[in-house]
Image (tube, helix red, strand yellow):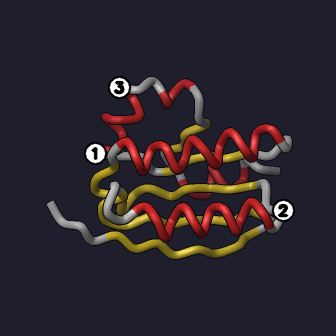
């Protein structure tokens, strides 16, 4: 298992997009958590996670995403997910998070859903 994790962020149409790559786990989640905290503090309440390149996620990675989801929802914002595949998709399904999050197979459709 690789402990490689990277993310890119961009902004399109007022939506902050995080493109996650590698393995989001206990050893890699800290910088992501800090980024999400500062994102929330800045008042950004429309977030899209693109998970096509995410190979693995563990409970700490899930926890970071859920924590942001709760904070954003309480401020009438939206957190959505696009291109969830492989092990992360299995975890989301196992934890029934596919019933909590709006998940899109297509990145552009996910982005358009914020309008």
**13 in relation to 59, above or below:** below
SS for callout 3? helix
Tell me what residue is drawn at x 39 percent, y 28 percent: 93
Q: Which residue is mark 3?
A: 94
- Are discs 3 and 1 less than 8 Å apart at CB? no
Tell me what residue is drawn at x 52 percent, y 50 percent: 64
Of labels 2 and 1, the one closer to you: 2
Q: Quadrant of residue 39?
A: bottom right
Q: Is residue 83 left or right of residue 47?
A: left
Cα–Cα gap, marks 3 and 1: 12 Å
Question: Quick one: label 2 or label 1, which is nearer the N terminus?
Answer: 2
Q: Which residue is mark 2?
A: 43
**96 in relation to 76, above or below:** above
SS for callout 2? loop
Of labels 3 and 1, the one closer to you: 3
SS for callout 1? helix
Tell me what residue is drawn at x 79 percent, y 62 percent: 44
Q: Is residue 108 left or right of residue 59?
A: right
Q: Quadrant of the N terminus?
A: bottom left
User: What x and y, as percent, mark residue 114?
Assistant: 77, 50
Question: Callout 1: 10 Å neighbours few (<14), some, many (20+)?
Answer: some
Res 86 label: 1
């Amino acid at each position: 298992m690789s402990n490689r994790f990277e993310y890119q962020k961009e902004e399109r149409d007022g939506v902050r997009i995080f493109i996650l790559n590698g393995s989001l786990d206990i050893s890699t989640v800290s910088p992501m958590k800090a980024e999400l905290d500062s994102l929330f503090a800045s008042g950004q309440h429309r977030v899209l996670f693109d998970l096509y390149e995410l190979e693995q996620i563990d409970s700490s990675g899930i926890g970071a995403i859920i924590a942001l989801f709760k904070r954003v929802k309480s401020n009438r914002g939206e957190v959505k997910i696009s291109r969830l595949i492989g092990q992360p998709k299995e975890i989301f399904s196992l934890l029934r998070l596919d019933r909590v999050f709006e998940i899109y197979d297509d990145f552009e459709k996910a982005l358009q859903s914020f309008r």
